[in-house]
Amino acid sequence: MIPVVTPVEMAAIDASAPEPLDVLIERAGRAVAAAAIDLLGGTYGRVVNVVVGKGNNGADGRVAARRLEARGVKVRVIDAAMRPPVLRRSDLVIDAAYGTGFRGEWIAPEVGDALVLAVDIPSGVDALTGEAGAGVLPADRTITFQALKPGLLLGDGARLAGHIDVADIGLDVSGASQHQVTVDDVAEWWPTRAIDAHKWNGAVKVIGGSPEMPGAAVLASTAAARAGGSLVSLSAPGVTVATPPEIVQRHVAADDFSADALVDIHRFGALVIGPGLGRADEVLMATRACISDATVPVVIDGDGLFASAWSAEGPAPLLRDRELATVLTPHDGEFGVLTGSPPGADRVASVRAAAADLGCTLLLKGQTTIVASPPEAEADPLGGHVWFVTNGDQRLATAGSGDVLAGMIGSALAMGLDADKAAAASAWLHADAANRTPADGLLASDIVDAIPAAIGAIR
Ligand SMILES: NC(=O)C1=CN([C@@H]2O[C@H](COP(=O)(O)OP(=O)(O)OC[C@H]3O[C@@H](n4cnc5c(N)ncnc54)[C@H](OP(=O)(O)O)[C@@H]3O)[C@@H](O)[C@H]2O)[C@@H](O)CC1
Ligand SMILES: Nc1ncnc2c1ncn2[C@@H]1O[C@H](COP(=O)(O)OP(=O)(O)O)[C@@H](O)[C@H]1O
Ligand SMILES: [K+]
């Protein structure tokens, strides 16, 4: 896992460091110079423009400039405040105008075909939210210090940062409460089955589907089975769905189905509820009863999120009452239904607040997936842990992809993984499975088929 630290947290870490700022800037500049030489493939005859601002980001750039010059590189230092609209030709531009202290607007100069190395974060990107104006220079590479910043992983910032390296400048970020998930984390967390396992160790119950949307239930169930669910039982209210033969179907009525659907729930490790259920009043009512009565960890997705919020009091009383783990998997629209407003510009703060308010693990879908746990102590209202999952791409934006993810999380919960790790590891494997498919023409069922290969690769 790679620590992620907000600008405010970084300032506090910096302030409590034993080294003076000058020493940290020297280390940062040295790392920038090394990255520049790496990008340039050498020093002899190379020309580098360094754009420097008046803050510490600019100071990092000046140190790098001095070091590159000492190595024989022809260096031009350009004051950000007096930049020309177009820079003279160079092999590389080091963008050290502004870092975590940026505010307002920034229009970068044109740099021709030079490579671009951003210092800490591309200048003009909000290090907290990833928001950026149109004038930001896209980087080929960003060298950031000690920890990632949320703005490098979110929104425009993720696109503009290029390849990201984290340089160790000796700061202590061990107290970070946010991390980016890596393949090593997933390999460590994802459960392996015991040698004496039987099919009821890790069984997953799915309540989903409807006459109008049977496919969502098929995708969630087969994904649960492919991800390790040893026995998957599907109850699709009022309809029999065409599933692979391995999925056990337990027929339930189209209304008032909670008692029948949950009759043997104690045999299961987790429940996935919501995909494709629809929003008829009787379905919403029965769905709420299932969420309240399920004596296992629950993943609530799609129409299950709508059902959770379908009350004059909102979703909190129903969800806070649950004793076992609950994972909510909204996209932005469903987040709005759950909390009353879509995520704000600071998506992490929105997800943390919702997790705290609802007492659930919350996974917010999107280009970057954010998972937040509810805080452990009431004294720390927004203190839950946060995971960023960034390995997916636009292939995942296909109908049914979210149903697959819900099934996978159900399987991870059933195998005993903690809710936040179940959600984060499933999102990572979901993306990795999609990354194994052709760039175009992906169907959600292709993700399901690729799950075993994604899991195989972490073993
Ligand atoms: N531990 C660490 O964290 C370490 C951090 N390090 C480095 O420090 C960087 C953070 O440095 P920083 O705090 O000085 O902020 P930085 O981004 O240089 O900019 C602030 C200055 O720019 C100005 N300014 C802002 N926006 C502007 C605009 N649109 N147009 C014009 N001016 C604008 C702003 O002016 P003000 O708003 O105050 O008027 C202020 O003067 C960080 O990203 C990393 O590279 C390392 O050196 C070592 C250890
Ligand atoms: N541009 C994107 N890049 C990476 N992942 C994406 C992108 N768009 C969507 N996703 C992921 O795809 C999935 C879509 O889920 P969802 O919107 O619920 O789809 P559906 O309701 O059709 O099943 C989520 O896991 C989301 O994080
Ligand atoms: K910068």
Image: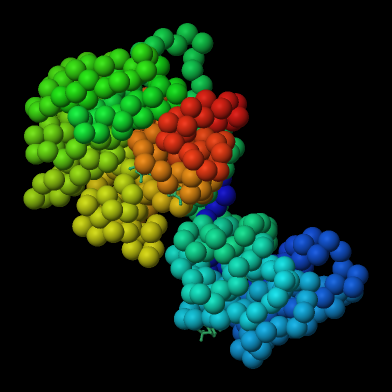
Q: Is residue 301 above or below residue 124?
A: above
Instruction: Please name whichever residue, 388 or 435, is drawn nearer the observer in this view of the structure.
Output: 435
- Residue sticking out furthest to the bottom: 82
In the figure, residue 255 lies in which quadrant?
A: top left
Instruction: Please name whichever residue, 94 or 323, is drawn nearer the observer in this view of the structure.
Output: 94
Which residue lies at the image location 83% right of the left edge and 61% below the top edge? 41
In the figure, residue 78 lies in which quadrant?
A: bottom right
Q: Is residue 1 above or below residue 451?
A: below
Q: Is residue 457 left or right of residue 23?
A: left
> How is the model colour-coded?
rainbow
Q: Is residue 379 visible?
A: no
* Percent coordinates x, y for residue 215 in the rendering: 31, 31
Q: Is residue 414 above or below residue 38?
A: above
Which residue lies at the image location 90% right of the left edge and 73% below the top edge? 45
Picture quarter with the C terminus: top right
Q: Is residue 34 left or right of residue 406?
A: right
Instruction: Please name whichever residue, 28 or 19, is drawn nearer the observer in this view of the structure.
Output: 28
* Percent coordinates x, y for residue 244 in the rendering: 37, 18
Q: How many numbered dots are placed on residues in this image? A: 0
Which residue lies at the image location 56% right of the left edge and 81% below the top edge? 107
Which residue lies at the image location 62% right of the left edge and 60% below the top edge? 162
Picture quarter with the N terminus: top right
